[in-house]
Image (cartoon, rainbow, N blue to C red):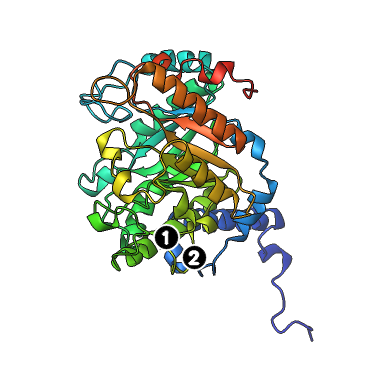
Amino acid sequence: MSRYPNPPHPAHQRTPRPLRRALVCLWCMGCITWFLSNFSPTDAKQDSHRSPIVDEIARQLTDKPLSTIRGVNYLRPTGYDADQCPDLQFGQDSICPWDIEAIAADMHRLQGLGVNTVRIFLNYYTFGGASKTNAEYDMAEALGHLDNFIDVAQQHNIQVLPVLLAKYPQDRFTLADLDVALRVHVRPVMRHLAPRSGIVAWDLFNEPDIGSPVDQRCWDWANGDHPECLPLAEERLLFLRHLRQEVRLFDTERPITIGMAFAKSYFQPAGTTFFADDLVEFYSFHYYDNDPYDSGRYAEHWYYGQGFPDDLIRGLTELQDLGRDKPIVITELGFPTGEGHIREQAELRRDLARSYEVTQEFDAGLVLWPFQDQPEELIGDLFTTSPATP
């Protein structure tokens, strides 16, 4: 009697061993593909507070690569009408035609001015969101243009810092909204971009700490004078945590950040279950003063109120004092000039030079906001004459 409860099939009836192995491999690959296509973070067990991946990458990440970022936010090719084409649409807006030659010319100019990084905004609708209203919308062309952009930047030794979910609807941060955003935008973009070179890091979301499109009183999500702001912050933090988990499914190596309007938003508001500090490998925040007027909201809401450069220094100091040893990059900083503004070119050069000195003192990177139309007018010799320039 056989010692097997059910005797094995005769050899001639068995599936050949090499074929069995191949079938097992195909089955495993199918499972992995299904998982990446259908996994929803809402189905996963939530981490308690701090992701171990955050700590591990932060330990491995040295300050130098990020502290040497000298960049600009690239919004459109030089010479394009800002009112007609405020942002890159990657060929999906007929009034803003795709012009890779103009972009290449800009990259050449930026390289000559010492720029090594460009921050770009990946429009939610351009990269998938439009499919919610047009089932036939295909982002393949936009992704192809995005590849061309990154390739041209690399040819000029410039790395790209993409911002996900740009222009995302500000009233859609529920878990149901999250599932839609992941399906139509985040997963397709990450599946396409994660394997390629030329990307320095991922910026999950631009200024989620500004809640004024939903509630003006929550312009700063840490506004403790209005109890409605804390639930808004909690909902957005949960959205960001799920978003981070999804990005990590596609890329376990590149650092992640969140482009906060305020440095303090990494450790405020008080009373939340966890902080944005727990979601990033490096801090990034934005600095503007009271010019132009629509940034003058700082006069009422800015929690420092000491002006330039003291507010900038305090923001950097508070992040450094958290003791997490995470690099810092100021991903938006700029000053408008000309008629109706408080600065002319001389004051711009002075204040940008002081800003760069401050960031170097804190080993922080710097990405300028292009209030000026021409790269030379914006950057000048800021990144090419400083003794701190590598």
Image quarter of residue 211: bottom left
Q: What kind of element bears circle 2?
A: loop
Image quarter of residue 332: top left
Q: What kind of element bears circle 1?
A: helix
Q: Which residue is mark 2?
A: 274
Q: Position of residue 373 (x, y in %)?
A: 33, 19
Question: Mark 1 and mark 2: span between their CA atoms?
Answer: 8 Å
Quarter of the image with the C terminus is top right
Q: Position of residue 235 (x, y in %)?
A: 36, 63
Circles 1 and 2 in contact, beta carbons < 8 Å: yes
Q: Position of residue 64 (x, y in %)?
A: 66, 35
Q: Residue at x 65, y 61 (%)?
A: 15
Q: Nearer the viewer, residue 176 or 268?
A: 268
Identity, as a three-letter code, of the amino acid under mark 2: Phe
Pointer 1 or 2: first along the chain: 1
Q: Is residue 229 above or below residue 95?
A: below
Q: Position of residue 230 (x, y in %)?
A: 35, 66
Q: Which residue is mark 1?
A: 237
Identity, as a three-letter code, of the amino acid under mark 1: Leu
Q: Is residue 244 above or below residue 379?
A: below
